[in-house]
Image (cartoon, rainbow, N blue to C red):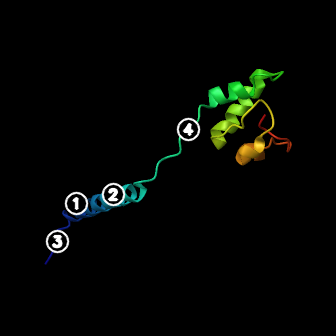
Amino acid sequence: MSISKSLIPSLLLSLLLVQLVHADQSVTSAGEGTAAPTKIDCGGACEARCRLSSRPNLCKRACGTCCARCNCVPPGTAGNQEVCPCYASLTTHGGRPKCP
């Protein structure tokens, strides 16, 4: 059995497409039943967290960055950082806590 040289690119492309479709189906079936974590409203959470701050715009900007990375904002206007370990662990370049 001899395959013409003009058919080789078509056969390779067909094989590649079959592999891609199979890989896509494997990923889809593996992910079934797992729900993506829900995103919190960082704007609202940071607004509440920073409402008593002496520098609310700076507070909201820092809080928003931390919230986007960690998907968590501690309750209240200060403290309670043990509720969000990721939020509490972020630091500035100077080693100071980043998140208000």
Residue 4 in picture, x, y percent from top left:
16, 68
Residue 90 shows up from this direction: no
Q: Quadrant of residue 90?
A: top right
Q: Which residue is mark 2?
A: 25
For image coordinates 41% across by 59% down, the residue present is: 30
Q: Quadrant of residue 93?
A: top right
Check whether the beta carbons of the residues at disc 1 and disc 3 lie within 8 A of each other.
no
> Which callout, 4 or 1, points to the residue nearer the camera?
4
- Sequence-wise, which precedes: disc 1 or disc 2? 1
How many numbered dots are placed on residues in this image? 4
Mark 2 secondary-structure assignment: helix
Q: Quadrant of residue 76?
A: top right
| 77 or 9: nearer the viewer | 77
> Which callout, 2 or 4, points to the residue nearer the camera?
4
> Which callout, 4 or 3, points to the residue nearer the camera?
4
- Sequence-wise, which precedes: disc 1 or disc 3? 3
Circle 4: residue type = Lys
Q: Which residue is mark 3?
A: 3
Q: Is residue 92 left or right of residue 65?
A: right
Circle 2: residue type = Gln
- The disc placed on residue 39 is 4
Q: Which residue is mark 1?
A: 10
| 52 or 93: nearer the viewer | 52
Residue 50 in picture, x, y percent from top left:
75, 26
